[in-house]
Amino acid sequence: MSQNRVAVVTGSNQGIGFATVKALCSDFEGSVYLTSRNEERGLAAVEELKKIGLQPKYHQLDINDESSVLRLRDYLKDTYGGLDVLMNNAAILLPFKEGMSDDIFAEHACTVMQTNYFDTQRACKILFPILKPHARVVNLSSMLGHLTHIPGEDSVAVNLRAKLASPDLTYEELDSLMHNFVDAAQKGEHTKYGWPATGYYTTYIVSKIGVSALTRIQHRDFERDSRENIVINHVHPGYVSTQMSDYKGVLTPEKGAVAPSWLALLPPNVQEPKGAFVWCDKTIVDWVKGPMPPLD
């Protein structure tokens, strides 16, 4: 059975993705695929893991390129009959630094939202139909993706949080909210709609709130799915020392991979966590109200 099982980690030639591949190679009974946009870097990362006795496999994957995702889907379907573990890790962070113009912020809003939310969602739509019964999906969110990062008690912010927290939120409604942020950011009017003020992490915050809200909708779908016990969760891996954090994080990538790999390996017919926001220490956190544990 293990010969036909397969796990895929997107954006995994470095950082948390690379460390997760490393963990799954040790603990997952089946083939583990390291993926990357750049094939040369991906193959170099595979060789690095092979030097320590692990046997990851490689497939090129650029979630910004629909044809790349389709090629992966077809390969997995033909080779393994489907997919057992999907780790949606690929993401970008474009910090808004002091002295940058409003035009730069507007450009960042488009680029970050496209990759982190819209292209992640598209990859899910392409790959979810080949998930096998008892598959596990892990969406990498962030503590910055917690709903409380939309601050304020004015009616606009309260209503925005209520929409995102709604148990009846649809894909179309969520897409519309994410488009609203991007469109408003082009005019410098995003705070009028309740979104966070322009800052270092703003575009990343909104994109990860989108990923977490998306996960909750996907969970509802899987609860009604005819395939048995497909489980999805979203996770804050911790403040990890990676290129994305300018190596300022307090956790190693290996520590950052602990909760994501644990969620990827949840046993059959598990009752929880399901559709949950999971902290880096594996505790379940209320995504809507919190409280969030102390910073890692």
Image (tube, rainbow, N blue to C red):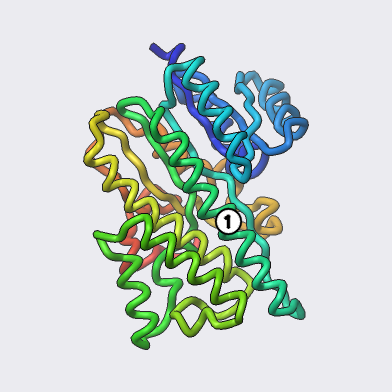
Residue in the image at 56% along x and 57% along y: 239
Residue 195 versus residue 282 in the image, above or below: below
Which residue is the site of mark 1?
Answer: 114
Q: Label 1 is placed on what type of residue? A: Gln
Residue in the image at 39% along x and 32% along y: 129
Residue 238 versus residue 96 in the image, above or below: above
Q: Secondary structure at mark 1?
A: helix
Query: Which residue ends up furthest to the bottom in the rendered image?
Result: 154
Q: In the depicted view, which residue is nearer to us: 79 or 277?
A: 79
Q: Residue 243 in the image: x percent, y percent?
A: 70, 52
Q: In the depicted view, which residue is nearer to us: 267 or 52?
A: 267
Residue in the image at 58% along x and 67% along y: 203
Q: In the depicted view, which residue is nearer to us: 174 or 132?
A: 174
Residue 102 versus residue 123 in the image, above or below: below
Residue 87 appears left or right of 199 = left
Residue in the image at 49% along x and 57% along y: 142
